[in-house]
Image (cartoon, grey):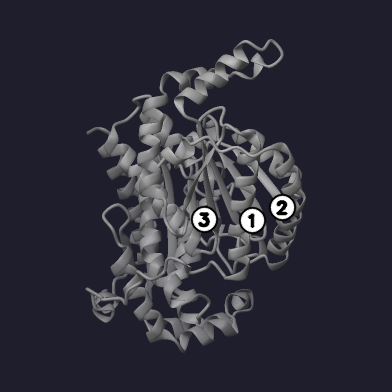
Amino acid sequence: MFESAEIGHSIDKDTYEAEVPALREALLEAQYDLKQQARFPVIVLINGIEGAGKGETVKLLNEWMDPRLIEVRTFDQQTDEELARPPAWRYWRALPPKGRMGVFFGNWYSQMLEGRVHGQFKDAVLDQAIAGAERLEQMLCDEGALIIKFWFHLSKKQMKARLKALKDDPLHNWRISPLDWQQSETYDRFVRFGERVLRRTSRDYAPWHVVEGVDPHYRSLAVGRILLESLQAALANNPKGKHQGNVAPLGRSIDQKSLLGALDMTLRLDKHDYQEQLVTEQARLAGLLRDKRMRRHALVAVFEGNDAAGKGGAIRRVAAALDPRQYRIVPIAAPTEEERAQPYLWRFWRHIPARGKFTIFDRSWYGRVLVERVEGFCSPADWMRAYGEINDFEEQLSDAGVVVVKFWLAIDQQTQLERFEEREQIPFKRYKITEEDWRNRDKWDVYSEAVGDMVDRTSTEIAPWTLVEANDKRWARVKVLRTINQALEAAFAKDKK
């Protein structure tokens, strides 16, 4: 793969200066079209050999284009804030919105290559990282992003010649960094693993472009042309849906009627038992979150359910057990303009708690396979592939020590009707009932089918669904608290093994 980058391409100064004005004009025009259409973001990944011109080329692109619409991010050593969260968190929160371009140095490829080259892990872990990168890029492209990946290359001979020339030049030897010397010693390993990564991750929806870096004129024009061609093609043809050919119809393994219909909705607690059990479980939760073992974990609780099923009441009973500094409640409503400009999981990634903390999602990423599916807010291809994307998201959280607890609070139709009518009659509860609630009630069977598919496809060993019989609010609140406590205790128990 790298052989073609070692041929020694060069462009003379006159040819370079003759071509640059038209290229700059076309790049600026494409950049402003990108901003105006605001249909997709552009993510440019910069990787390759030290000294091959990565920084110089990106600096030049900022001169050729409008730098106000380009955000350059460098991911060096992880900060304490980043170390306290799943590895992908630092990349998700840096994604550019639709209409803008983000240039990422030190991205996910840099991290996996450096780790493997320096023996921090074996090939099996590298392969896992490669697969994770493929899943991330596939999802971003399916959400509409344009990903352009550059590998700037120098042969070993070219790299050594550059280092010798700089070392002997007293005016420029400061440009040699410790990383240059380090990579000169590990060049063969870096290139070997780099080629493995590039071959595995160069896809039609996110291809690699290997650029020879020895001649700055050739390098600059090559990158500019690739960037321009990619932008023009994406602007002419909506890139969304490039990789959706693998979507298949659902083949349900669990009948949704038996799933929800099997719940015993008569389960109840009398007032005395409720008060006793509630206080016990709240004290248990307070103790668990103060436990020193919580320093290795974070806690995420997801609340979904029928309208009027008592999610708010259950959340309040959980929060009542805790110091407000220990938790955060994130209510999820219709996405804002800022959120619509990003992939749908972005709005949830940004709220993932650090170790030792607890985040409660009042509705969640499951809106993609529930309300967005039922109301037609996204295409069937979008919500059908979302099951796998959600499972991957939750697996990343679990791998980073996040305990994920998911609740579906279920009530029957008669109980929902009674609660709706009660809300309309009591002044301080009227704000809880809207026309949309009544419209959703008319789609009870459709929502039930979506819930069945959701539980069937996303109840995993690492993040199982807990179905809560919520006709009796007291029973539901205690079950929620007890389930959270059991999940934390199980996570702490695994730490000992």
Which of disc 2 and disc 3 is earlier in sequence? Answer: 2
The residue identified by callout 1 is 228
Q: Position of residue 296 (x, y in %)?
A: 39, 35
Judge by depth and name the residue closer to the eye, 254 or 382: 382
- In the figure, is residue 193 to the left or right of 163? left
Which of disc 2 and disc 1 is earlier in sequence? Answer: 2
Which of disc 1 and disc 3 is earlier in sequence? Answer: 1
Q: Position of residue 60 (x, y in %)?
A: 71, 40
Check if mark 1's residue and mark 2's residue have beta carbons within 8 Å: yes
Helix, strand or loop at label 2? It is: helix
The residue identified by callout 3 is 348
Q: What residue type is labelled 1?
A: Leu
The residue identified by callout 2 is 23
Kindly report which numbered mark, 3 or 2, lies closer to the viewer in this rendering.
2
Residue 307 seen in render: no
Q: Tell me the quarter of the image containing the C terminus.
A: top left
Q: Which amino acid does label 2 sit on?
A: Leu
Check if mark 3's residue and mark 1's residue have beta carbons within 8 Å: no
Question: Badge 1 local density, few (<14 within 10 Å), some, or many (20+)?
Answer: many
